[in-house]
Each structure stands twice: as structure tokens, then as C-alpha cells.
Amino acid sequence: MTLFEELEWRGMVSEVTDGVREALASERVTAYIGFDPTASSLHVGSLLTVMGLARLQRYGHTPIAIVGGGTGMIGDPSGKSQERNLLSSAQIDENVAGIRAQLTHFLDFDTAPNAARIINNADWLGTIDVISFLRDVGKHFTVNYMLAKDSVSRRIESEDGISYTEFSYLVLQAYDYLQLFDRHHCTLQMGGSDQWGNITAGIELIRKVRAKKAHGLVWPLLKTSSGTKFGKTEAGTVWLDPARTSQRDFYQFWLQTDDRDVINYLKYFTWLDRAEIETLERSITEDPAARLAQKTLAMEITKTVHGDAALKSVLDDASLRFGGAATAENLQQVAPVASIARERFAQGLTYSDLVVIAGLAKSKSEAGRLIDQGGVSINDVVVSDARGAVAESSALGGRFKVSKGRRNVAVVEITP
């Protein structure tokens, strides 16, 4: 199977220029995708793009990740109804550094013969002067051509319109493609379907300026079967950075995937092959209650993004939350939410105190009511006396599993 065939069966081909299929089958192609540094972390909406580059590298082609330190100061109008807030150079630099670190989990930048590259387009956009740019690049784009692009026409029709700043974005990105073509013999740009206009603009610029052929390939924009935007929850965006979205919440996000979406997500976001995914697809109808496809999806993506140790931690956490017995060993695998100084036991630590420290009640009176109703257990043992003293010796490996009901669970550790 060629890379193009792989992308096709995974549903990752929406539009493509002539010759891409043949080039990917017969040549070692250098291709790039751009990442907008509007935050210091990528989110799950970026994962399809990241996996596109990773699959490219696995098939022997060379990936380039452009982190738009230059264009990021402008903002891409594609898919946006309003102009973005402009970021400072310092903010851009901080965001670029965060994205670089995350891409290393997916791409080999060091050892592979087709090692990936991370390039900041500020390297060339930050040095070019306005007159030279207008003379050498701008003259190749008619206003009529730019107005015909969806990313521009939709904004012009909107109430807020589009500024000259964002109007120029298409030309800047086309210039990126030309620079990569000249510097690295890059002949393919990939991305989401909202980037098609920007990609074809770059292809046209290369044709006009260098009389050479370049290519483009885009995949569909992701939406859930229910019509909501992919990657959004009630709590907000799901980030790859565990400081923004905990590894537990990241895992749970994938675990809650709708049956109608899970097979597509397995194709998009995992390395599982066709036979494995077809087996999981059958499990949805044969044993839907087991949710094997969702569990596999959550485990595979958590392992890819956060590593084996993080996956083990979230699985241990899930086991504790959904009926697993607390032991000293498995409590050590779960990140504690709070700590208690050892001296507190000598001062008199009550069960209601412990529930509040664990964050499962806002006050001792609320904790007391929960305990009186039989809704609290410590290390899987229901407690009935809110004022009862907690013994340090009852901890398991220096930690307590504190549960409110069946699913609200917290781990509290003892510190010196």
C-alpha cells in the first residue's frame, strides 16, 4: 500500500492536485504542513494534521513542520469569522517552543534518513522588506484571484469584513511554499480542507516564478456526528499539554467517543492497521456494551501523546474510580490531588477533614452530611462517623483513596 492509498482508506483525502498519487508512489517526496502558533500547546483538533506528517515519514518521505512565527503575527483568516488578536513577538516565541516540543512525540528529527525538520517562517518573513515583497511576490497575485478564495470571500461577506493585514495572509503563505521549494526541494503541501485556497496559491506562485510543478493534498475538516466541533467539551478545548488538560481527562475525552465516530477516529488518529480496525468495527454491533473500540482508541492515543507511563497511570486511575480495590501499589500509580502533613494526625484529623482536603466537599458540614448518608468511603471502606479520627496507619503506602459515591474518587498522600 502506498502512502496515498493509506490516506485514502483512512478517509484523509478530500481534495488533491493532479500527480500526487504518482509522486508518492514513485518518489521520495518532501512535504510540509503549517502550524499556527496561537497557543503554546497543540490541541486534539491538530492531531489529524500531526498524524498526516507522521504517516508521511513512516512511508519514507521527508516531513517539514512550519511553525508560523512570521505568519502567526498576522493570523490566518481561513475558517474565522472575526480577526484574531495579534500576538507579540515574545508570545509567538513562547508558543513556537511549546509546539516544537510536542511534535517530537510524533516525528523523528534526529536518526531517520528522512529526518523531519521544524522551520520557523520568521527566518525569511522577518527579514524581507515591503517594497521587495510587493515587487517580487505581490505582482503575481491579482485582487480578483484573492477575492475568489473562500477564506477571503466569506470574510468580506461577513459583518466585520477583513483587514488588509489578514487579506495579505494568502500571499505570505504562498511565499512560504516558494521558500521551502527553493531551500528544501519541498513539492507537496498538506493540511485541512480550509487550507486549500492557501495551498493552491503557493502552487501557482511556484509555477509562475520557477516554472515548476508543486502539489497539494487536503483532508476533510473534522466534525462529530452530532454536528458539534471536534475537540470541544463543556470544559473547553482538549489540549495535548497535560498542564492544560490532565492526562486523565484526555483519556476520558476519547473514551466518551460516539459509536458513530469511533471508527473514523481510529483511522485518523492511531497506527492500527485495516484488519485491526475492522475487527473493532464488528465489536460495536456484536458487543456494544463492552465499548472495545472506544477503549482501544483512548489507550492508543494516550500512549502516543503522553507515553506508556501516563497510560498506565490513567488506567490505574480508571480502575480505582470504577470499582477497582485500592492497594498500596495501585495508589502509587495515581497522581494525588492533595497532601496532608504527617503532623496533622497528631493534631486530630477527622474523616470530614479528609473529605474536604480531597476536594470532594466544600466544607466540613457538607462532608458530614455525605458521611451520614453513607456516601463516603476511605480505601473502599464506608465510613459512618464524620468526627471519627483518621489513623495514619490506615493509609496504604502513605496514601488514601477517598471516594464520594462510585465515580468521584481522589487520592490524598501523606507528606513529612
Image (spheres, rainbow, N blue to C red):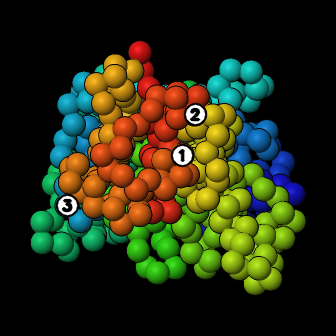
Say if mark 1 contacts mark 2, CB within 8 Å: yes
Q: Earlier in the sequence, mark 2 or mark 3?
A: 3
Tell me the number on the disc at residue 82. 3
State the image quarter where residue 172 is shown: top left
The residue identified by callout 2 is 396
Provide the secondary structure element on which disc 3 rests.
loop
Tell me the number on the disc at residue 54. none
For image coordinates 54% across by 46% down, the residue present is 379
Dot 2: few (<14), some (14–19), or many (≥20) neighbours within 10 Å? some
For image coordinates 50% across by 44% down, the residue present is 401
Q: Give the answer, above or below, for where 142 lies relative to 223.
A: above
Q: Amino acid at mark 3?
A: Gln
Q: CA distance from mark 2 to mark 3?
A: 54 Å
The residue identified by callout 1 is 379
The image shows residue 152 at horizontal and vertical percentages of 29, 64
Residue 161 seen in the current view: yes
Q: Give the answer, above or below, for where 98 lies relative to 157.
A: above
Q: Amino acid at mark 1?
A: Asn
Q: Nearer the viewer, mark 2 or mark 3?
A: 2
Number of marks in the rendered image: 3
For image coordinates 67% across by 61% down, the residue present is 295
Q: Residue furthest left?
A: 160
334 on left or right of 201: right
What quarter of the picture does the C terminus occupy? top left
Provide the secondary structure element on which disc 2 rests.
loop
For image coordinates 57% across by 34% down, the residue present is 396
